[in-house]
Amino acid sequence: MRYLAVVSLAIAVRLPGVWRNALSQDEVFSARILREPTVPGVVRHVIRTESTPPLWYLLGWLVHHLGVPVVDVRLLSVAFGGAFAAVVLALASEVLPRGYAFAAGLVAALAYEPVVHGSQLRSYELLALLAALLGLLLVRSLRAPSRRLDIAVGATVWAGLLTHYFFVFSLAAVVVWLWVDPQARPLRRRATLAIASAGALAAPWLPAFVAQFRHDRYWWIPRFSARVVLVTPLRVFAPLGVRHLAAGVVVLGIACTGGWLLARSSAAGRLIVAMAALPILLAAVLWAGGMRIYAVRNLIETAPFVVLAVAATVAPLRRAALPAAVAAVAAAGAVYLAVAARPPAQYGAIARALVADGWRPADPIAVFGNFFSFRAPLEWYLPHDPLLDVSSPTSAHCPAVFVVQPNGAGSFTVDRLTGVPARVRHATVLASMHGASCVRLSHSPRLEPLT
């Protein structure tokens, strides 16, 4: 019953986002890949436009070509989210008392980062699931090693390496634990062999990884910020960032306290601590060294272990333990309700308003704020599949310029104007390559459309 409750809750909180939310920028890139007619086309497209390996896209492509509409392929992430919550509950049951393990499973089902990505057309939820599953398999191998578990570890590692490159950080944490923790000695050689075998099977993808790395898809990431690193555990639970550094330090302190308790308790606890902390530390060190790869969403692989570290602070509280566990679940639920109450992005409605006002593929569109948030979704929802590029006004007169103006609370108004009004000059103008002569395309490789 505990597993049924946790899985049901995880699926229930993820399902509404499948049909409520418009496709975001990155999801549009995924959708274009899923529409490829052949598997080789999928692989070529992934290498050309993505910064991740191909496994999730191949799974999504297969589901789509079995007859599932592109948007409904998001249900894959929902299923992975349900499995993620079940695996976290199983892992928590290995290191925590029964009731507190159940609370950890409920928090994992409701945690912000897994919930947000649990209804998206992206690979993040699968990454979180595979990291949690690897931890669970190793903990169970500690108790009763077997060839079946070795094969499962190898299969999980292979799938993780072909799902997201940040899985390497979780794998590094596992290897460190295997070769440093004395109680991991009985498992050391057989687990290392399973990991090495999986790496060899995934190695044929390495030339494609090199090609993707040269495309520099992470160019948009800013310089190193210790504040971003400090608030990373907080982002597992709530949509807060560097402006909420105090809250981030509190959550980090709670997680460190729970990690210390887990590390003292058993080898399984030390594995959980390693998989919670080392991926963040390794990614941060590379970022500080000049590799701009640190994005909090890529570290969703630490979410199951951060949840367990926080949960581990509750059990020793004695009389206050049960109220604290209930409060933690309630807080996670409150965050979910607050996020669910936000109005979704209105890209489809904006596209319909543009068409209703007479927009044609040659007409420029001016948007305010982060133009990346608009460009790919408008390409997807507007008719004729226009390819919109960043542009700047020329001295020529525009017969029509369409301005998408935010009104707050997620709503927008669309205005049709002539010329290039002053307020448009403070926006980003998107235009197709066959657009009007009143704009000049940027021709920057970093700003060109990805198709």
Image: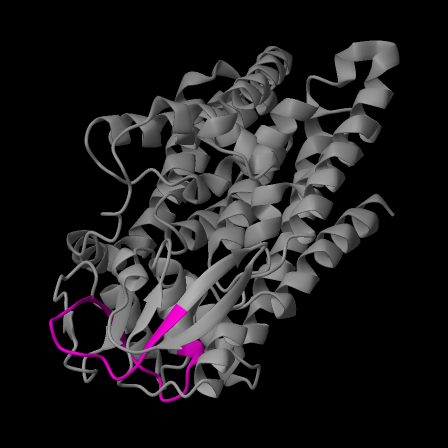
Q: Residue at x 36, y 82 (%)?
A: 36
Q: Check if residue 387 falls in the magenta segment.
A: yes
Observer-nearest of 315 and 254 = 254
Q: Check if residue 265 falls in the magenta segment.
A: no
Observer-nearest of 155 and 220 = 220
Instruction: Write down the quadrant of residue 331 in the picture.
Output: top right
Q: Image check: 273 left or right of 365? A: right
Q: Residue at x 37, y 43 (%)?
A: 166
Residue 23 against residue 95 in the figure, above or below: below
Residue 44 appears in the figure:
no
Magenta region: which residues?
A: 380-403
Residue 239 against residue 209 in the figure, above or below: above
Observer-nearest of 381 and 410 = 410
* Percent x, y of residue 22: 54, 68
* Percent x, y of residue 329: 77, 34
Instruction: Write down the quadrant of residue 319 in the picture.
Output: top right
Q: Image check: 364 left or right of 24? A: left
- Looking at the rendered image, the quarter that the C terminus falls into is bottom left
* Percent x, y of residue 408: 55, 54
Residue 118 appears in the figure:
yes
